């Protein structure tokens, strides 16, 4: 198929935009379905009259995109969605699609809002009926969202969300219900382990963060920098120790930012090769000095009033005052 046929066959118009790679038109926008126009109108529209019928899993993607970008669902698209639901075509969504969709949910900016919508639409039961109604962990996802917003934007922070997401999602479920969810969806063993071992692994990190030896900001920074992101956020959400909570908050909002703002050029005067072990050690020492307040911004020197070249007076006499005339006080 041509690129245009490929784009027209996709689900939603905003997912049908591409850039040309041809030599004569490299970088030109290809938008046969007018997806850019729909983006400007903040509207979500299907590409065809059969898009949701052909693949019912797209109804989950529809709500995911709507929640992520706060889009309005176009009228005919909503009618097609309602027809799909009336025909109960959502029952044809495969287990594989549900499992993959669950992983996509974990990476959404606000997974709690998405799950709340799915629960309202009666689609959360596709994953497990145990997740619906009173078992939906609204308070837990509110804390999860707050923790995600604490992570500084644009600064490296390795975070594998699946385990933490599954922990919050199933927090109100019994052990039997959790086991049934794993079996029904065929959740990968690695994801199950990251979910089940999250609490025990986080306790070790919590014990470290409670240590009275971490008196300096640099020590807290080095204690948390190698830690797994999901464990850090888990403790930020769940730890009962105020000291642990405050140290994590300072690390995310202050220490990581400070370390990121120190460029390699600040070590140019050392003559060390960037990336070499000595260079890395020197930069770590510089970061520690900034974190612990041993390096402060230089205060600009002020020139004495009587040394300015346009002052017109000798040293020791403020500019503009004739010689021999004493200073007088004014009200």
Image (spheres, helix red, strand yellow):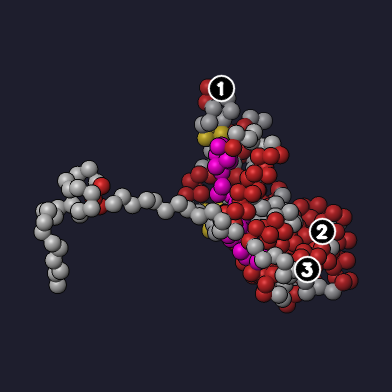
* Front residue of 199 and 299: 299
Q: Earlier in the sequence, mark 2 or mark 3?
A: 2
Are the two marked residues, 1 and 3, in contact with CB atoms closer than 8 angstroms?
Answer: no
Q: Tell me if mark 2 has few (under 14), some (14-19) or many (20+) residues whose alpha carbon lies within 10 angstroms of its own.
A: some
Q: Which mark, by number, is residue 23?
A: 1
Question: From what the image shows, is residue 299 above or below residue 278?
Answer: below
Q: Tell me if mark 1 has few (under 14), some (14-19) or many (20+) residues whose alpha carbon lies within 10 angstroms of its own.
A: few
Q: Earlier in the sequence, mark 2 or mark 1?
A: 1
Mark 2 or mark 3, which is nearer to you? 3
Query: Please, what secondary structure does the residue beneath circle 3 have?
Result: helix
In the image as oriented, which residue stretches furthest toward the front? Answer: 324
Query: Please, what secondary structure does the residue beneath circle 2 have?
Result: helix
Alpha carbon of mark 2 to alpha carbon of mark 3: how far? Answer: 20 Å
Mark 1 or mark 3, which is nearer to you? 3
Look at mark 3 in the image and give the residue it sits on.
Answer: 207
Horizontal and vertical percent for residue 35? 53, 44
Q: Which mark, by number, is residue 194?
A: 2
Mark 2 or mark 1, which is nearer to you? 2
Q: Tell me if mark 3 has few (under 14), some (14-19) or many (20+) residues whose alpha carbon lies within 10 angstroms of its own.
A: few
Question: From what the image shows, is residue 241 above or below residue 188?
Answer: below
Residue appearing at x 61%, y 39% in the figure:
8
Q: Which residues are magenta?
A: 247-269
Q: Main secondary structure of the magenta part?
A: helix
Horizontal and vertical percent for residue 34? 51, 42
In the image as oriented, which residue stretches furthest toward the top? Answer: 24
Alpha carbon of mark 1 to alpha carbon of mark 3: how far? Answer: 58 Å
* Front residue of 305 and 35: 305
Horizontal and vertical percent for residue 21? 59, 28
């Amino acid at each position: 198929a041509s690129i245009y046929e490929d784009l027209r066959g996709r689900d939603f118009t905003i997912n049908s935009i591409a850039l040309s790679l041809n030599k004569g038109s490299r970088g030109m926008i290809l938008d046969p379905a007018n997806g850019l126009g729909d983006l400007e109108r903040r509207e979500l529209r299907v590409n065809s009259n059969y898009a949701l019928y052909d693949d019912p899993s797209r109804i989950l993607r529809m709500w995911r995109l709507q929640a992520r970008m706060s889009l309005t669902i176009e009228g005919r698209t909503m009618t097609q969605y309602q027809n799909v639901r009336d025909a109960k075509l959502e029952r044809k969504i495969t287990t594989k699609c549900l499992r993959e969709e669950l992983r996509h949910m974990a990476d959404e900016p606000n997974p709690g809002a998405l799950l709340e919508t799915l629960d309202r639409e009666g689609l959360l039961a596709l994953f497990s009926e145990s997740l619906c109604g009173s078992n939906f962990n609204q308070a837990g996802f509110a804390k999860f969202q707050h923790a995600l917003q604490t992570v500084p934007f644009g600064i490296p922070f390795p975070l594998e969300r699946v385990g933490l997401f599954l922990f919050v999602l199933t927090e109100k479920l019994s052990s039997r219900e959790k086991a049934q969810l794993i079996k029904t969806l065929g959740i990968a063993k690695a994801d199950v382990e990251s979910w089940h071992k999250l609490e025990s692994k986080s306790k070790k990190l919590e014990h470290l963060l409670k240590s009275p030896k971490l008196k300096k900001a640099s020590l807290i920074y080095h204690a948390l920098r190698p830690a797994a992101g999901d464990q850090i956020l888990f403790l930020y959400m769940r730890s009962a120790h105020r000291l642990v909570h405050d140290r994590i908050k300072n690390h995310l909002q202050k220490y990581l930012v400070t370390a990121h703002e120190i460029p390699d050029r600040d070590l140019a005067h050392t003559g060390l090769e960037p990336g070499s072990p000595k260079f890395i050690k020197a930069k770590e020492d510089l970061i520690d000095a900034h974190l612990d307040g041993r390096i402060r911004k230089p205060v600009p020197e002020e020139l004495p009033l009587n040394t300015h070249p346009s002052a017109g007076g000798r040293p020791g006499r403020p500019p503009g005052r004739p010689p021999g005339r004493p200073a007088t006080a004014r009200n």
